[in-house]
Amino acid sequence: MLLIRDFYRMEEGGAGMDANKDRVEARGEGVTRRRFIKAVGLGSAAAGLAAVAVAGNAAGTGSESTKKKPGTESGKKRLKLTVGFSENPRVAPLREGIVKPQNIELEIVTVSPGTLFYRNLSSGPEFDVSEMSISETLLAKERSEAFGKGRWDWTPIPVFLSRGLFWAALYVNTSSGIEHLRDLKGKKIGVPDYCMTAALWFKITLKDLYGIEAKDNAWYNGRTKQLSHGGALGLDVQGQGVDKGVTHRWLTVDQTLDVMLDRGELDAIFPPSPAGGVTAGRSDVIDRYGGTPMVNNPRVRRLLNDEGKGAIYEFFRKTGCHQPNHHVIIKNSVLREHPWVAMELYNAFQQSKEIAYERARKARSTYLYFEESDWKEQQAVFGEDPYPLGIKAMRKTVERAVKGSLEQGLIRKPIKVEDLYFRTTLDT
């Protein structure tokens, strides 16, 4: 079964589909995984994934690098940085202080991705370091001058600690004739945000595995123009919307993807967020829910019986690309004054992940994509490290994301990896 921790609590709806608390003013973590899983009927096995064991001491915990960083002096006052991040077991050792970057003191705040990314785009990053959508970073880079108004003054580092695979929990209308992913060509599909990274990888998967182009379908944006990431990026502006002949429509505040699927007005949708109750018509809720039962409903059903495992494995075998949905951004004001911070944080996230892997001997969900998988089976597909960091390991993946963004009419010009990530991280 898909690890809903990483695939559903995305942004984007990454990615931020916590309907109850994903409001503009929201500051908290949002709907728990257990409540979501119970609400949509994913089963007790998935609910068990909500708890991550933290017992067990990892080798090297508490150790710090003793190498002196450029521009620092022994005994110099530590640089204080605020960090905004969603709940993630691979970041837990850093949050707990087990991993301590040299000469940096971190104050880490847990925020649901959808809310965090919307605030990053609408008002600019409030945190010095932040988790951020890869797709929306590409758009922000291209559209900064026209729409950023100085708000998007950040640079990413190649730290990829989540996967945008929650699209595999796709729901379809039972009268749509959709029995397989290849049957989605020509259908009406609802996503929280067309520009979200999970939707980007979903469309890339359809193209690379089944030859389905983004323009072959009609796409419905579940979030309103006012509260969507796409709206903050100017995709609602005449002449600046989705390009390449793609049909893209916005829902009104009274419309919801689940109700439209139930009525047959849509053929397929990303999983809704019913845990916060009915929120149709609520202008302060990012991901609204209309009250459609998603289990024991003769009109809707989950498409993939294997939770997408077969398609996800096939995609990686064919392309060699992972499907990360978030990376880490740092304010340029920090990087200009302290360029050494980029690599210090990169190394800290790397060490945090390695300690989390050690913990995963008791909490397998940290490194297994699927609950039922055997480690050796997954290793045969993805290798020993299912969450690789750095440019060398992830260049092909990032380049495919850029190409997909071009294909889907999101960005207009190619973006080189070297022009995207901070210069000191390019040799990682």
Image: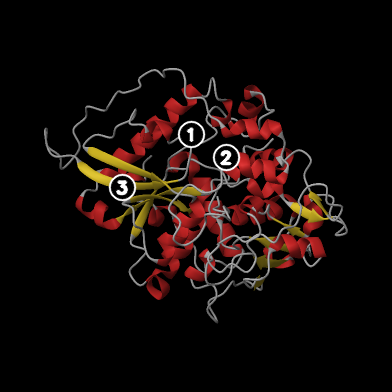
Query: Pointers 2 and 1 in contact (CB under 8 A)?
Result: yes
Q: CA distance from mark 2 to mark 3?
A: 23 Å
Give residue 73's quadrant in the image.
Answer: top left
Contact (Cβ within 8 Å) of mark 1 with mark 3: no
Query: Where is mark 3, residue-wise?
Result: 82
Name the amino acid, label 2: Arg
Residue at horizontal 35%, vertical 55%? 155
Instruction: Confirm whether residue 132 shows in the render.
Output: yes
Helix, strand or loop at mark 1:
loop
Q: Which residue is mark 2?
A: 5
Q: Position of residue 250 (x, y in %)?
A: 63, 72
Please rate how many residues cluster around mark 2, counting C-alpha atoms within 10 Å: few if below 14, some from 14 to 19, many from 20: many
How far separated are the C-alphas under marks 1 and 3?
19 Å
Residue at the spot of label 1: 89
| Picture layout, residue 425 above or below residue 269 | above
Disc 1 marks a residue whose amino acid type is: Pro
> What's the colour scheme?
secondary structure
Between residues 377 and 334, which one lies in front from this camera angle? 334
Using the image, determine if residue 6 lies above or below residue 97. Answer: below
